Amino acid sequence: MINSLEELEALANTKRCNEQNCQEELRVCVGSSCASLGSENLKEILDAAIKENDISDACRVKAVGCNGLCAKAPLISHCNRATKISILYEEVEEADLDELIQSVLNAAPVTHKHCDITQDFFAAQTKIVLENAGIIDPDDIEDYIAHDGYKTLFETLENKLPNEVIEEIKKSGLRGRGGGGFYTGLKWESVAKVQSEQKYIICNGDEGDPGAFMDRALMEADPHRILEGMALAGYACGADKGYIYVRAEYPIAVEKLTRAIKQAKKLGILGENIAHSNFSFNVEIRLGAGAFVCGEATALITSIEGNRGNPRQKPPHLSDYGLFGQPTVLNNVETLANIVPILKRGAQWFKSIGTASSSGTKVFALTGHIQNSGLVEVAMGTTLRTLIYKIGGGIPHGKKFKAIQTGGPSGGCIPESLLDLEVDYESLKKVGSIMGSGGMIVMDEDANMVELARFFMDFCKSESCGKCTPCRVGTVQLTELLDKFVHKKATKKDLELLQNLSHVVKDTSLCGLGQSAPNPVLSTLKYFENEYLEGISND
Amino acid sequence: MQTQLGSSDDRYKLLEKSMKKLGYDKNALIEILHSAQETFGYLDKETLKFIAKRTKSPYSKVYGVATFYHYFRLKPKGLHNAVVCLGTACYIKGADKILTSFEEKFEIKVGATTRDELLSLLSARCVGSCSLAPVVLFDNKPKGNLTTEEAMQKMQEMLND
């Protein structure tokens, strides 16, 4: 049990000392992309080889979370603690492992499969949320503690009042990373103000947006940081109970979080009277079951309560009437992962990164027709051009860029003419898209925008919960209209109808799903109208 | 008290145990359905009725929740299963064509199981392996960067296994 900041630091020091002799570390990425290419098997082979050569005192093999460059999976990095030199190897296969072990044994360099970590993909990123990803072992709470984990929580409990925490978060200008962009500090304050016996903190890990995997990677790579963020939110708002709502489709994330909670409880970092303070905090996991609408706040809450995920009208807002009717804070995974660095390094530091209206960084899942697909974290205000050409390495096969889709089924497509757009909440909204949770899908010249709009509408149609008419009926009608354009059987009148109906669904739906479902249609109509005109038959 | 429904089947005992752990809580219905599906492979009417009875919820409520979420299956799965990811990244890289080729080859629609119960063909909204798009999960093992031909080949390999 850890009862004070001193004891926490003592544990961190012991862990660091224990590892001091172990100079070499092989970090095998077991993030989703690497794992599906057999990286767990690679780790086992390395483990066996270390044992066989009897060098387990000098070299350790560690399973770590996502390194980011998923296009080059599986990735293994070799770090030397003394020289602080770290070498990254890409596309590692079983046959390469011998050479890798030899390089550890004899300091003989590996001649191939080097991945240049000074390349733009890494250099142009700013890692705050993902700073531990690919470095710490998510299954080992001591490793997190040795990297200053839970120190912020313990320091805050000792030295700060809840309203001071809220002030700091407010000053930092942190905004919700799930897509809405509401100021986190204000959200916390509105819950902290309400007098209530019971309050809740909910972490939204129901990443339903197809083409996005930021939250998955975070939960898998650094689960303790999310728990620490939740506990700090609980302290600030006066809540003693937290829920993490995770998609059941992410079994590894569920496993890592479950283990993290168990470890934190065992050490008394979660539970009753943390560090002998009056603050108690417990966390439970709730599994989602595959419903996009459950990303919507009220739908998510009713789903945690064991119901069909139908959203409801707001107000009452969650700050007054949330989970089980009690005041509730609902934050996205990435938002909560930002809390620890803000409190550790201060609001001013955080504000110095990003743009005036959107401070900090954003994690994006860069996929589609792009060279370096993977997970990237950049300062707000980075241009799309930097993201696609510098970090992403451009479009493969010498093809031309056509559009980038942000915000998933609720977002829009952005054409080449707007590539110098500096990405933040406002700028994306201005061009008819949204930040969304952070999926970015790049499309080359061969992509058909009408088909894409139809794909998203079909998705919203099947995900519509059916509670309100504009969304339930509108999405069906819109899909059928788009079908006509795809099959080049539409009329001029259909084009008018498509526009009108899109606005009706947008303006009159009950929740965010319906209100934003027409966005892909409206944005492609705006920038690629000619493709719709091609869908109009002449006879 | 053991109900008539589940008395003859050990799997009901397992389900009973996990419901007990959750305190027969109505709020934990989704958790209960998850563990029931894990135990039985799918949720049939008998199982749903059993859960309704034990949690003192109306059957309509349990059925309503089970049918709302995509993750819950009301029909048994085949011996093998293939899940084609239809997330956006997979879609623009041709996942729809892979799915169509499977549908044509095995003469079933997505969501169905072949008559010999050898194969269930499913789709996913996004499995979060977008960098490897297009992705198909063959018996839960993800395979990425597939062409339609490669996907069909992997499928045959799985079925011959």
Image: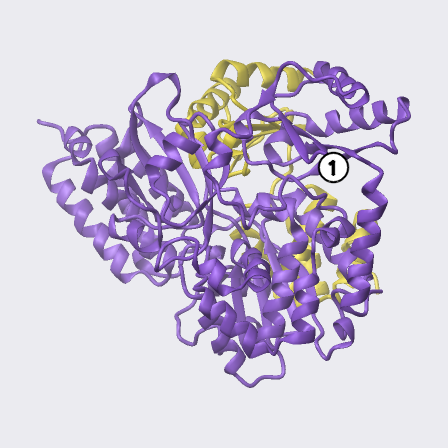
A110 lies above or below A149: above
Q: Quadrant of the N terminus of chain A?
A: bottom right
Q: Can you give x and y, in whole percent of width and height, for residue A370 in the image?
A: 41, 27
Q: What amino acid does circle 1 point to?
A: Arg
Q: Residues within 10 Å of mark 1 (few under 14, many from 20)?
A: some
Q: Which residue is mark 1?
A: A81
Q: Colour of chain A?
A: purple
A261 lies above or below A397: below
Of residues A252 and A58, which is closer to you in this image?
A58
Q: Residue at x 44, y 25 (%)?
A: A371
Q: Can you give x and y, in whole percent of width and height, for residue A457 in the image?
A: 34, 43
> Is residue A306 toward the left or the right of residue A361 in the image?
right
B20 lies above or below A376: below
> Is residue A509 toward the left or the right of residue A490 in the image?
right
Q: Residue at x 82, y 50 (%)?
A: A15
* Residue ranking furthest to the bottom: A195
Chain assignment, label 1: A
Q: Quadrant of the C terminus of chain A?
A: top left
Q: Can you give x and y, in whole percent of width and height, for residue A266 in the image?
A: 82, 61
Which image quadrant is residue A111 in?
top right
Q: Residue at x 43, y 42 (%)?
A: A439
Say whether residue B46 is visible: no
Which image quadrant is residue A352 in?
bottom left
* Residue ranking furthest to the front: A83
Say whether residue B54 is visible: yes
Q: Colour of chain B?
A: yellow
Q: Residue at x 52, y 44 (%)?
A: A214
What kind of colouring is applied to the model shown?
A: by chain
Q: Can you give x and y, in whole percent of width and height, for residue A99 in the image?
A: 74, 15
The secondary structure type at the circle numbered 1 is: loop
